[in-house]
Image (cartoon, rainbow, N blue to C red):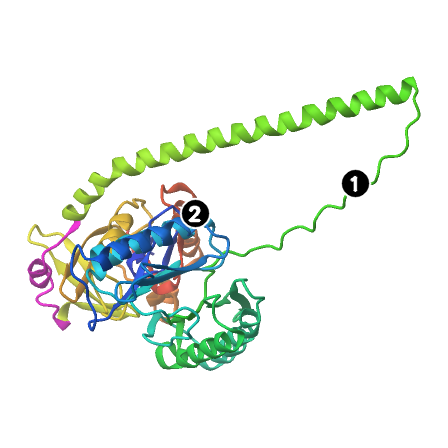
C-alpha cells in the first residue's frame, strides 16, 4: 500500500487566492477614446494635471465620490473629472486607489487622450473634455468573469437574479448626497454563500440609477452565465457577484448616547464639597488619561507604518531580480513539452491545459498553459507569480517559474507523478488504494498546507478553489 504526502496546487495568478497583505490598487481595465487627444505641454495638459491633483486630494471624502472641473473659464481647454470608490472602502484605501489611477492613466494607459476611464478593483477614475456630471452613461461597458464554473447553474441563476435584483432599490433610493450602494448575501449550498454588490455614482437620480443597475444586471447572463463570479462595469454604475466575500461588511453605527441628566440642586455642606472636589478631579484626570492613550496609539501606529514602509522599499529590488530569475523563454517551454504535444498532455482544468515536460538539465516539470480569457495584464501576472514563488512549504507544490510572451501565459511547476486526489477518490478501482491510514495523512497534509497559508506564511492567503483535483499526491 503506497503512502501519500499531500501537496496543494495553488494558482494565485488566476485569482483563486486572496491576499490579506497590503498591496497597490489592482488594475482591471481602461478605455481611451481615439477621437480626441491633446498635445504635450498644452493648456489642456496643465488643466488635466490640476484636475488629477484635485481628485486625489479629495479622495478622503466620506462619500467616496467627487467631481470637479479644471480650466472652466475656457470651454476649449476645460477638463471634467470624477472618481468613485467602492462604498465600503476606508478613506485611506480610497485615496490610495485614486492616486494610483491618476498616475497610471496619464503615464501608462492613456497618455495624451482627452476622454479616459480606468477601473480598478476598488475605484474608478474618469475625465473628459465634455461634461458628463449627472449623466447616466452605459458605454463603454466592460465584462469581467471568474473562470470557475458553477455545478448547478439553473439553481444558481435563480438565486443570483433574486439576490442582486433585490439590492437595486436599496441603492437607487438612497437619500440625496448619500452613497448609492447595496450588498446582499444568499446561501447557494450548505457550504457556499453568494455575495453581490451594486453601486451607482451618487450624482445619478433615483430613476437613472435604477435603470443603469437593471441594465447592467441584464447583461450578466451574456458574459457570465454558469460562472462563479462576474461583473459589469459602466461609467455610471457597476454590479458584481462572487462565491467569496469581496467587500467589507459594514456594521451600523451605535446609537447616540443619551444626554446626561441635569445636575441635582446642591446645598452647601462638607459632604457635597467633597463630592464636587471628586467630580472636578475625575473631570481633569480622565481626559488627560484618554489624551495620553491616544498619543501612545498614534506613536505606535507611526512606528509600525514606518517599519512596513522600510521593509517594502527594501523588497523592491529583490522582486525585480525574482521576476528575471523565474522567467522561462517560450522556446524552452515548447522544447520541453515537444511543442505541447498530445503525448505530453496530462489533463485540462478550468484555467487551461497541463503538460508534462523535461528541461535541458533533465528536470521534469508540469506546464500549465493558461487560457486567454482571464483579462489579466502582463505586469499583474508577473507580480502575482513572484508572490506565489515566495511560498515554500512541504505541502505546497513549488512554482518554478513562468512564461509571458504575446498572448501566452504559462506557469511552470514541479512535477508530481502520482496525479491528483480526484483520480483516486472518484475512481472505483483506485479507491481501494486509499485506506483510512492514507486518508488520514491526506487530511493532515491539507490542514498543514492551509495553516501555512492562513497563519504561518509572510503573505496571509486564502485558497479559493480547494477541491480534489487541486490536491496532488506524491509517491513518497
**Residue 89 appears in the picture as rendered:** yes
Q: Using the numbered discs, state the Cα–Cα distance from disc 1 to disc 2 in whole angstroms.
A: 35 Å
Residue that numbered label 2 is attached to:
92
Which residue has dot 1 on it? 260
Magenta part of the chain: 326-342
Element marked by disc 1: loop
Question: Of circles 1 and 2, which is in front?
Answer: 1
Q: Earlier in the sequence, mark 1 or mark 2?
A: 2
- Could you tell me residue 310's position as x and y percent? 31, 33
Q: Residue at x 19, y 66 (%)?
A: 37
Instruction: Return the x and y of residue 436 as percentages of the image width and height.
Output: 44, 57
> In the rendered structure, does residue 332 fall within the stretch colored magenta?
yes
Camera-nearest residue between 458 and 272: 272
Please, is residue 365 above or below residue 157 in the view? above
Residue 472 found in image quarter = bottom left
Q: Residue furthest top?
A: 270
Mark 1 Cα shell of 10 Å, populated few (<14), some (14-19), many (≥20):
few
Q: Is residue 124 above or below residue 210?
A: above
Looking at the rendered image, the quarter that the N terminus falls into is bottom left
Q: Are marks 1 and 2 in contact (CB under 8 Å)?
A: no
- Horizontal side of residue 58 vs 346, given as left or right: right
Residue 190 appearing in the image? no
Q: Depth check: 429 or 123 in front?
A: 123
Nearest the viewer among 347 and 238 is: 238
Q: Position of residue 99 (x, y in %)?
A: 33, 51
Amino acid at each position: 500500500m503506497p503512502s501519500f504526502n499531500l501537496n496543494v496546487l495553488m494558482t494565485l495568478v488566476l485569482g483563486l487566492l486572496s491576499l490579506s497583505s497590503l498591496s497597490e490598487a489592482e488594475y482591471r481595465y481602461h478605455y481611451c477614446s481615439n477621437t480626441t487627444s491633446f498635445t504635450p505641454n498644452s493648456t489642456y495638459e496643465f488643466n488635466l494635471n490640476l484636475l488629477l491633483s484635485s481628485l486625489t486630494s479629495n479622495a478622503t471624502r466620506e462619500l467616496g465620490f467627487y467631481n470637479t472641473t479644471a480650466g472652466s473659464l475656457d470651454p476649449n481647454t476645460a477638463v471634467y473629472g470624477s472618481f468613485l470608490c467602492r462604498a465600503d472602502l476606508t478613506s485611506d484605501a480610497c485615496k490610495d486607489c485614486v492616486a494610483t489611477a491618476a498616475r497610471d492613466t496619464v503615464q501608462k494607459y492613456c497618455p495624451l487622450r482627452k476622454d479616459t476611464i480606468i477601473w480598478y478593483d476598488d475605484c474608478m477614475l474618469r475625465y473628459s473634455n465634455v461634461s458628463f456630471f449627472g449623466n447616466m452613461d452605459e458605454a463603454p461597458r466592460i465584462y469581467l468573469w471568474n473562470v470557475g464554473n458553477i455545478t448547478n447553474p439553473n439553481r444558481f441563476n435563480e438565486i443570483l437574479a433574486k439576490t442582486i435584483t433585490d439590492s437595486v432599490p436599496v441603492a437607487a433610493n438612497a437619500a440625496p448626497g448619500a452613497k448609492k450602494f447595496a450588498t446582499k448575501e444568499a446561501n447557494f449550498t450548505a457550504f457556499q454563500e453568494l455575495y453581490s454588490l451594486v453601486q451607482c455614482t451618487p450624482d445619478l437620480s433615483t430613476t437613472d440609477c435604477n435603470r443603469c443597475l437593471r441594465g447592467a444586471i441584464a447583461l450578466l447572463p451574456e458574459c457570465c452565465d454558469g460562472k462563479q463570479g462576474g461583473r459589469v462595469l459602466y461609467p455610471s454604475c457597476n454590479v458584481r457577484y462572487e462565491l467569496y466575500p469581496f467587500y467589507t461588511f459594514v456594521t451600523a453605527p451605535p446609537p447616540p448616547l443619551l444626554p446626561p441628566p441635569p445636575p441635582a440642586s446642591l446645598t452647601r455642606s462638607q459632604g457635597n464639597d467633597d463630592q464636587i472636589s471628586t467630580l472636578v478631579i475625575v473631570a481633569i484626570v480622565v481626559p488627560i488619561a484618554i489624551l495620553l492613550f491616544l498619543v501612545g496609539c498614534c506613536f505606535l501606529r507611526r512606528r509600525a507604518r514606518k517599519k512596513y514602509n522600510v521593509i517594502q522599499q527594501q523588497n523592491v529590488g529583490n522582486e525585480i531580480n525574482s521576476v528575471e530569475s523565474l522567467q522561462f523563454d517560450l522556446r524552452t517551454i515548447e522544447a520541453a513539452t515537444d511543442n505541447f504535444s498530445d503525448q505530453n498532455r496530462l489533463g485540462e482544468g478550468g484555467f487551461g491545459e497541463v503538460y508534462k515536460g523535461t528541461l535541458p538539465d533533465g528536470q521534469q516539470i508540469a506546464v500549465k498553459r493558461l487560457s486567454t480569457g482571464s483579462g489579466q495584464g502582463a505586469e499583474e501576472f508577473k507580480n502575482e507569480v513572484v508572490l506565489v514563488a515566495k511560498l515554500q512549504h512541504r505541502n505546497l507544490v513549488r512554482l518554478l517559474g513562468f512564461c509571458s510572451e504575446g498572448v501566452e501565459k504559462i506557469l511552470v511547476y514541479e512535477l508530481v507523478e502520482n496525479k491528483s486526489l480526484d483520480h483516486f477518490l472518484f475512481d472505483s478501482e483506485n479507491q481501494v488504494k486509499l485506506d483510512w491510514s492514507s486518508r488520514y495523512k491526506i487530511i493532515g497534509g491539507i490542514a498543514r498546507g492551509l495553516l501555512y497559508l492562513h497563519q504561518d506564511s509572510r503573505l496571509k492567503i486564502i485558497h479559493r478553489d480547494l477541491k480534489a483535483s487541486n490536491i496532488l499526491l506524491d509517491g513518497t
